[in-house]
Image: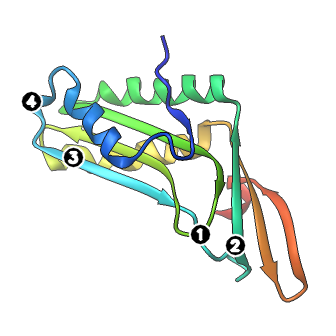
């Protein structure tokens, strides 16, 4: 059964994610926790001001893919746990959108897996962003593709 990994804004916080990892069987082996916290940028690449960001997801598919990524990366030697939790809803600049936690036996095992987890969720998970921006011509809104903004 897939665990919930896509959450409405306000229903999970970083402390919850850390606690879930610590409660996992075998966590006593961990000597390091690495974290990635994705936040809303307040400015686009073209210097537009981000008024707000809306995030939507195909939740069942997104939960399954996030769980699969976690299951895959948990198989890496010296990894004790991995948690990826993505928020959906409306967000303003600087608000948190995603938590990725990797716990490992040693810090050297944690960082490469943390990076891989972030890259994989960004490429694989069906989460969609709508930016509401302000520029010199006024306000506009548009759906953003990750591939377009890299």
Closer mark to the observer between disc 1 and disc 3: 1
Looking at the rendered image, the disc whose residue lies closer to the viewer, 4 or 1, is 1
In the picture of the structure, the residue carrying the numbered disc 2 is 50
**What residue does disc 4 label?**
28
Sequence-first disc among 4 and 2:
4
Which label belongs to residue 93? 1
Q: Is residue 46 left or right of residue 120?
A: right
Which one is nearer the viewer's eye here, 2 or 74? 2
Badge 3 or badge 4: first in the primary sequence? 4
Q: Residue at x 40, y 25 (%)?
A: 72
List x then y, in percent, for residue 54: 71, 53
Query: What residue appears at the point 49 percent right and 49 percent down from the top-left corner?
Result: 98
Point 23% across, 39% down: residue:
103
- Badge 3 is on which residue? 33
Q: Secondary structure at mark 2?
A: strand
Task: Note whether residue 113 is visible.
Answer: no
């Amino acid at each position: 059964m897939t665990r919930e990994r896509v959450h409405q804004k306000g229903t999970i916080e970083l402390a919850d994610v850390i606690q879930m990892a610590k409660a996992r069987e075998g966590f006593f082996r961990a000597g390091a926790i690495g974290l990635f916290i994705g936040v809303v940028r307040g400015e686009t690449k073209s210097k537009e001001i981000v008024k707000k960001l809306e995030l939507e997801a195909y939740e069942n598919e997104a939960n399954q893919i996030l769980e699969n990524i976690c299951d895959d990366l948990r198989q890496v030697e010296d990894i004790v746990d991995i948690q990826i939790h993505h928020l959906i809803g409306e967000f303003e600049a600087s608000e948190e959108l995603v938590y990725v936690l990797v716990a490992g036996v040693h810090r050297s095992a944690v960082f490469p897996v943390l990076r891989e987890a972030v890259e994989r969720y960004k490429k694989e998970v069906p989460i969609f962003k709508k930016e509401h921006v302000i520029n010199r011509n006024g306000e506009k809104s548009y759906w953003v593709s990750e591939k377009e903004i890299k």
